[in-house]
Image (cartoon, helix red, strand yellow):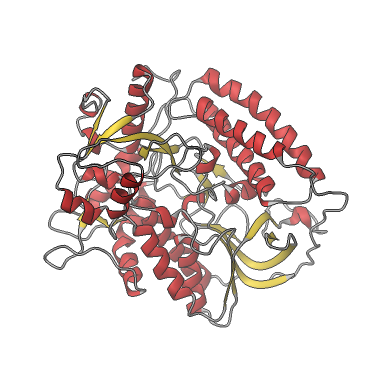
Amino acid sequence: MIRTNFLVIGSGVAGLTFAVKIAQKLSDKTVTIVTKADEDESNTKYAQGGVAVVLDLEEDSFQKHIRDTLVAGDGLCDEEVVEMVVKKGPKRLKELMLWGANFDIDASGKLDLGREGGHSVHRVVHHKDITGYEVERALLQSLNRLPNVTLLSYHFAVDLITEHHLEVPKSRQVSCYGAYVLNQRTGDIITIKADSTLLATGGIGHVYGRTTNPVIATGDGIAMAYRAKAEIRDMEFVQFHPTALFTAKEGPLFLISEAVRGFGAILRTKNGHRFMPDYDERAELASRDIVSQSIDNELKRSGDTSVFLDCTHLDMDEFKRHFPTIYKECLANHIAIETDWIPVVPASHYLCGGVVVDKHGRTSITNLFACGECSRTGLHGANRLASNSLLEALVYANNSFKYHLAHPVDPIDVSIPPWDDEGTHIPKEYILIRHNLTKLQALMRDYVGIVRSSDRLAKAVLHLDLIYKEVEELYKSSKITTTLCELRNMINVAHLIIGQSMERKENRGGYYNLDNTIAL
């Protein structure tokens, strides 16, 4: 048993920002961070673009940023949330810089602002093409100075602890008392008892296999919250990044940042046709849903395996300065962008839905908060505007921090039983896990991808049900392992995506069903 005041599950920008703030302000309280890989392994680390924030008041304004966000969200954003996040952005960025995060400066000494798809002006603050990595570095540096923080690497959160696990009367209002956590090095399951728990577990990209997310993005927080009966919404809005580097390998794909198109790169078919003006007057700078759907349509029409991003006309010295990591990755794949086009395909990138939270980050479960990509705040609506994710995480982590200061949580005073795995055994072989993971990812790509249909969704339900039953039988009889729990979580997430896709009867933003409207 570990007793802590604040339990943070996840070590990306959302979780670390909250942890740093609460530990600094409440030095007499303890903060425990649980992360299933290295402390710096998160979706934040791989965020190339930057932080969208209004700084240049001559060219930009809060109203412009709000409008761009609402347009991208296709009528489903919460306008009050959009206004709140956009207006709080500059202060949160300044705070991040005070913590030591470095961002690129232009020739005049001001922050160098980039432009990405969906933005009407240049407003994206960045650190070359590794902004997330730099943000993560600064936050961990600040965190490591705090004596009241314990960071447990290679610890996997298995389930949230609620009344379901306790010998107490079941109430209509569910409360969270911490989590059961697997020590991946020893195989032991620890009970962490917490007064307040924050989910900051990131995204779900690995559910599709072909993703820009790291392999840790398996929807763990959303699945745990779903099993605990939290409200989950907008799971149908899976954002596919239009330009992931196409390779024949399985697993995560390298992201070619949106900012490359903002820099002037052009999308072409293998025959050289620049096709984006055929679909949208903004061409390559259209929002991600439009660009992804357009590429998907071109690939289905031609039967090709990829389209191409043409950078050959760009200033190569400037390109290398802005995108050194992308340039090196292309070279490593035998692509010299001075002369070669970059083969790209859309890949699962970001989830606009998740665990429903209010403006303070509170979920529908008492003492359970959520922040970052695993949460559904209302900011993104049907489609996230590029580089609004780091902004959202910074603002909501601060909101949750301030709420805890104004409303201190009472110490948990219940008896929590240890994890019960009596009657389970170590599986003799793990081929069933790998087999079902492969089936699940193929199912989601083929039946629940960028463009969906009612018939494919109905068939997906039947296929998923077979996978679910087999994995649940294995889960109930086996000793807990990370891979088994991740697969179980991904099945829960797939169920939510498919079910909420079937409920949506109109196409909005990142959701496109052939039976809801005329095809592209």
Residue ranking furthest to the right: 423
Above or below — where is 123 with respect to 20? above
Quarter residue 10 falls in: bottom right
Residue 205 percent across, percent down from the top left: 50, 42
Is residue 452 visible in this depiction of the protein?
yes
Q: Point out the image quarter for the N terminus.
A: bottom right
Q: Is residue 453 left or right of residue 305?
A: right
Q: Is residue 429 left or right of residue 141?
A: right
Residue 134 percent across, percent down from the top left: 36, 64
Quarter residue 330 falls in: top left
Quarter residue 193 falls in: bottom right
Q: Nearer the viewer, residue 177 or 151?
A: 151
Which residue sits at x=39%, y=60%? Answer: 133
Which residue sits at x=49%, y=56%? Answer: 42
Q: Nearer the viewer, residue 431 or 368?
A: 431
Is residue 67 visible in this depiction of the protein?
no
Above or below — where is 445 with respect to 425? above
Which residue sits at x=59%, y=65%? Answer: 153
